[in-house]
Image (tube, rainbow, N blue to C red):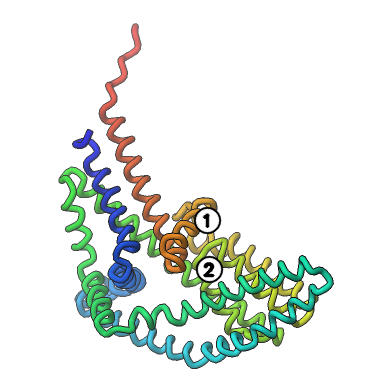
Amino acid sequence: MWEKNKTSICLAVSFILALSAFWLLPQLAFVVFIALLIDLLLHPLVDHLHQVRYIPRSVGAALSLFCFVTLATGLIAMLSSTLAASVQKFTHDLPTLTENIRELFSSSAFLSQEIDNLWTELASLSITAVRSSLTMLPSVFSKVLDIIIILFTAFYILKDGRHIQEWFARLFPAKDHLRVYRLFGKILRALNIYIYSQLAICFLMGIVVFCYFSLRGLPYAAVFAVVSGVSEFIPVIGPTIASAFGTALTATVSPWVALQTMCFYLLITQINHNFVYPMLIGRSLNLHPIAILLGILLGGILLGAPGMFLAVPFIVIIRLVIKDIYNAAKQRNEDEAPPLLPPES
């Protein structure tokens, strides 16, 4: 039994230990994860420089990292100088906004209390999401040692990623080297599709929401653009919270504007989930909404807000590993099945 399923058991245990590192050793795990994320973002560029421009991978990795650090630094500086003021103003005006919403439903004590509780919860979640998006990267890169470790780890993964995959594959029985190597390739391709698609959807959603609030002359356009963009990293739950929060805010302007905003959010959500998301990601991830919801809830319980962000990538990895183990067992059973007897004459 052990010999037949050695590779499958080792794969399951290895990925369980790797994923549990985010709970047992969160700082180290997140540093490695960020380095892997940088690799997934820059790997196509390094491959292009190496295969098309004939630039050595070490030089291509260094150039790509330099461009990434420059772009990230400029983006963080721009957000810090523009969005921080909007967030501070929004936080300052939040009590007044809450009171305005309470007055809209003052005729019903029960409804007023429920709306007040819902608004407070939505505001708390949204402000936390915005602040997390602004402080997550600075907090990770707050130490010089972390910066050095992340950049060097990302550099060597970009430079020697294929050799690292081959080394991991050789840790398993020789007959399964190709199987394990292909599994790593499938996982990296799926994560690459997910990350690029999610980034595209986040930027697209943020720009559309910003344009809507700006063109309508509604306040806090930048805040709600970031809330809508960041919320896309938490499928189903995130966009719902962002839509409810944006609609509740515009209710302080007028009920008619709130109704229009609700219709706007419903429209862009349907376009996103029925056209944009399938076009960018397609059926490559093949995740059921129930699996996504349960994964987000479990990730939030175990790791808090970061766990909710990491839920879908974790589910993708787990699904691919389980599928690989199932296919290997199915193939082995077919190979060991006795041959069919010829029909009697």
Note whether 161 is above or below 335 in the view shown: below
In which quadrant will I find the C terminus?
top left
Q: Quadrant of residue 194?
A: bottom left
Note whether 87 is above or below 12 in the view shown: below
Residue 183 locus on image (x, y percent)? 30, 52
Left or right: where does residue 2 sit relative to residue 184? Answer: left
Residue 132 locus on image (x, y percent)? 47, 77
| Residue at the (61%, 86%) spot, across then down | 90
**Mark identifier at residue 220:** none
Residue with the mark numbered 1: 293
Q: Quadrant of residue 263?
A: bottom right
What crowding class fits label 2: few (fewer than 14 Cα within 10 Å), some (14-19), or many (20 or more)? many
User: SS at mark 2?
Assistant: loop
What crowding class fits label 1: few (fewer than 14 Cα within 10 Å), some (14-19), or many (20 or more)? some
Residue with the mark numbered 2: 232
Q: Earlier in the sequence, mark 1 or mark 2?
A: 2
Residue 75 locus on image (x, y percent)? 43, 86
| Residue at the (76%, 72%) spot, across then down | 259
Q: Amino acid at mark 2?
A: Glu
Q: Quadrant of residue 33?
A: bottom left
In this rendered view, identify the residue nearer to me: 287 or 299: 299
